[in-house]
């Protein structure tokens, strides 16, 4: 078996995503909508598995983390306090030839030329600042008094609930609050498939610690978040930590690192880890008039905690997992495309095939399929020859295929085929679930 990685081709990922039902253009029958995408059957399950892996590892398996699910629509003052109303802007330029709009600070990144632009060159007008928040009205009357925003990050929902969480749980500093959910940004340029879109999901942690311990916790989260990707099988040669230079930092931030991935379009941010000091809690305390403090019961001390924030895009990580797991190889002289997704993330864990559609094969295969799907996401496939069925599952990233054949009917054994090693072994039907437990957990 020869293996070639093809992670340098985003087109191949886009084609596979459509062909196998991971990601479709949104509203495609109406011609699609720029930068909006829908997750198909395999994509929806993959996204769910990414969220579940993050939630389990960052919340359920930790004693110092609790979860939250705040409303997308929040009080408009939240965004004044956070600085988003006054400062969440991108510089925009418009081409006077073709009307296309671009982020002025991203013009060097190979902006595509348009045929209307003279000599293939855009003629840019003045740079204008453009607020990225989507604005709408709460209630039927369109009035500035009713103006609200779709949240541009999930983080602020955590800060405004700091007091509620402290009062309603037994958390002790240092502790974190974790949240997953939709965020919206009216991005001027959306490119590279699902990498930058206007509607996306985030998985964010605000980790509260005592001032003075923030450097230590920043170092911890920098390493822990990098290791999370490694544990999920991501090729660490395509993953790096990039510390922000002093002039890149927000005025309230003392340190920030991006975990970057080598996408087909170059090294790009996957996740940000920032030390936000006590800025957000102090801002919300000032704007709301409510104290947001940690009171240490033993020492009697009170202080505003510092915050370390690891912030990951769910959709962006899904794209990364597709790119990273994509490979092409040759099996017995035939080309194969395979997604080597980590077993925890694979949308389908096991595919069950009857070798024939007669002679008792389907009945036995359905029995095995029903047993497996009680415990693991499984699929049943009896169409086409066995080689075609393997290819379909390889492209879906299914780690295990189980085939029911003539021998099964006499000795209750099945063939178990491994996606990555291509090894095929005979296993007793009653030994399948214990074997899968070792593989999938
Ligand atoms: N609360 C901090 C915050 O939101 P950010 O760097 O703006 O920081 C964090 O966003 C992560 O959210 C990014 O690293 C990226 O994974 C994801 N993200 C941000 N904007 C996005 C967009 N327009 N489309 C998809 N993902 C995005």
Image (cartoon, rainbow, N blue to C red):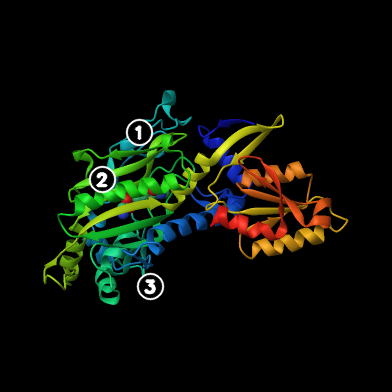
- Residue at the (28%, 37%) spot, across then down: 126
Query: x, y (%) of residue 109?
Result: 38, 32
The residue beneath circle 2 is 256
Q: Residues within 10 Å of mark 1 (few under 14, many from 20)?
A: few
Residue 26 appears in the figure: no
Label 1 to label 3: alpha-carbon separation = 39 Å
- Residue at the (22%, 44%) spot, across then down: 249
The residue beneath circle 1 is 107
Q: Which of marks 1 and 3 is in front?
A: 1
- Say whether mark 2 is within 8 Å of ligand 1: no
The residue beneath circle 3 is 139
Please state if 230 lies on the left or on the right of 77 as rendered: right
Nearest the viewer among 18 and 429 is 429
Nearest the viewer among 50 and 13 is 50
Tell me which numbered mark, 2 or 3, is placed earlier along the sequence: 3
Query: x, y (%) of residue 324?
Result: 50, 40
């Amino acid at each position: 078996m020869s293996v070639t990685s093809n992670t340098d081709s985003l087109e191949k990922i886009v084609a596979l995503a459509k062909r196998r039902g991971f990601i479709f253009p949104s509203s495609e029958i109406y011609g699609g909508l720029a930068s909006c995408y829908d997750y198909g059957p395999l994509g929806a399950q993959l996204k769910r598995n990414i969220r579940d892996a993050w939630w389990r590892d960052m919340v359920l398996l930790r004693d110092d983390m609790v979860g939250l699910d705040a409303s997308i629509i929040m009080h408009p003052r939240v965004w004044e306090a956070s600085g988003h109303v006054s400062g969440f802007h991108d510089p925009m330029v418009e081409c006077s030839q073709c009307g296309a709009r671009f982020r002025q600070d991203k013009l060097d990144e190979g902006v595509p030329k348009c045929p209307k632009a003279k000599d293939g060159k855009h003629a840019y007008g003045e740079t204008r600042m453009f607020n990225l928040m989507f604005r709408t009205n709460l209630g039927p009357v369109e009035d500035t008094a009713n103006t609200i925003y779709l949240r541009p990050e999930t983080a602020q929902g955590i800060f405004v609930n700091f007091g509620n969480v402290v009062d309603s749980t037994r958390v002790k500093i240092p502790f974190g609050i974790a949240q997953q959910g939709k965020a919206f940004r009216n991005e001027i340029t959306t490119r590279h498939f699902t990498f930058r879109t206007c509607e996306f999901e985030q998985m964010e942690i605000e980790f509260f610690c005592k001032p003075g311990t923030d450097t230590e916790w920043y170092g911890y989260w920098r390493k822990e978040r990098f290791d999370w990707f490694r544990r999920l099988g991501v090729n660490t040669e395509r993953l790096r930590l990039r510390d922000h230079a002093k002039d890149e930092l927000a005025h309230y931030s003392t340190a920030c690192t991006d975990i970057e991935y080598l996408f087909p379009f170059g090294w790009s941010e996957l996740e940000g880890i920032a030390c936000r000091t006590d800025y957000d809690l102090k801002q919300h305390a000032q704007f709301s008039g409510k104290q947001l403090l940690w009171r240490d019961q033993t020492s009697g001390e009170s202080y505003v905690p510092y915050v370390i924030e690891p912030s990951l895009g769910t959709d962006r990580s899904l794209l990364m997992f597709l790119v990273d797991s994509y490979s092409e190889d040759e099996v017995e002289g035939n080309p194969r495309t395979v997604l080597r997704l980590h077993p925890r993330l694979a949308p389908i864990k096991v595919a069950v095939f009857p070798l024939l559609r007669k002679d008792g094969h389907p009945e036995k295969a359905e029995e095995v399929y029903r047993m497996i799907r009680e415990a693991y996401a499984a699929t049943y496939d009896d169409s086409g020859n066995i080689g075609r069925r393997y290819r379909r599952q390889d492209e879906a990233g299914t780690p295990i295929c189980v085939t029911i054949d003539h021998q099964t009917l006499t000795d209750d054994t099945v063939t178990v085929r491994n996606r990555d090693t291509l090894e095929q072994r005979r296993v007793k039907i009653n030994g399948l679930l214990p074997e899968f437990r070792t593989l999938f957990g």
